[in-house]
Amino acid sequence: MKNAVKLTFVFLVGLFFGFLTQPAAAQTASCIGTASLDVVIEDCTDIEEVIFDRYYRLYPNPASHAVTILSTLPQQNATLQLVNMLGQIVMQEQFTGFLVLDISKLSSGIYFVAVQTEQNTAVKRIFVR
């Protein structure tokens, strides 16, 4: 019986990264093997990506207690998600043009704010202290 190696990929708009984990049973000095993997990422034609800073303001960044996000566009009906580096959604709110997110209970690190409307998705990296 061969030991399996788990490969996990996370894709956020504009970002792609992966994690490779191996069970302890497979970590022996006599275990040698090779593997190959082809990854193809195609453009999403149904979501138009926009530059976050052109349409939205986010401050302060870095932050430790709260982050304010406001839109330079007319009032909109959008969904705002705060995503951690593992691709997990840690917060999700309706966004109509102005929102203050309480980030005081989050662990320090890098997160992504994604604002998704019917027309597009914009993503911004934020730093939580």
Image (tube, helix red, strand yellow):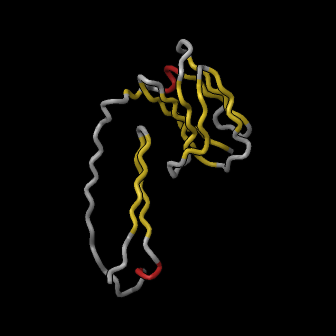
> Residue visible at 45% across and 75% down?
23
> Residue visible at 65% across and 26% down?
99
* 3 relative to 15, above or below: below
Residue 14: where, in percent of width, then height? 41, 38
Q: Tell me: 68 left or right of 116.
A: right
Location of the C terminus by quadrant is: top right
> Residue visible at 73% across and 42% down?
104
Name the residue nearer the viewer: 114 or 51. 114
* Residue at the top extreme of this rendering: 74
Name the residue nearer the viewer: 10 or 1. 1
Residue 54: where, in percent of width, then height? 49, 20
Residue 17: where, in percent of width, then height? 42, 51
Badge count:
0
* Residue at the bottom extreme of this rendering: 30
Residue 70: where, in percent of width, then height? 61, 21
Location of the N terminus by quadrant is: bottom left
* 97 relative to 24, above or below: above
Q: Tell me: 23 left or right of 74.
A: left
Quarter location, residue 20 = bottom left
Quarter location, residue 80 = top right
Q: Tell me: 64 left or right of 18.
A: right
> Residue visible at 31% across and 80% down?
32
Q: Tell me: 65 left or right of 21.
A: right
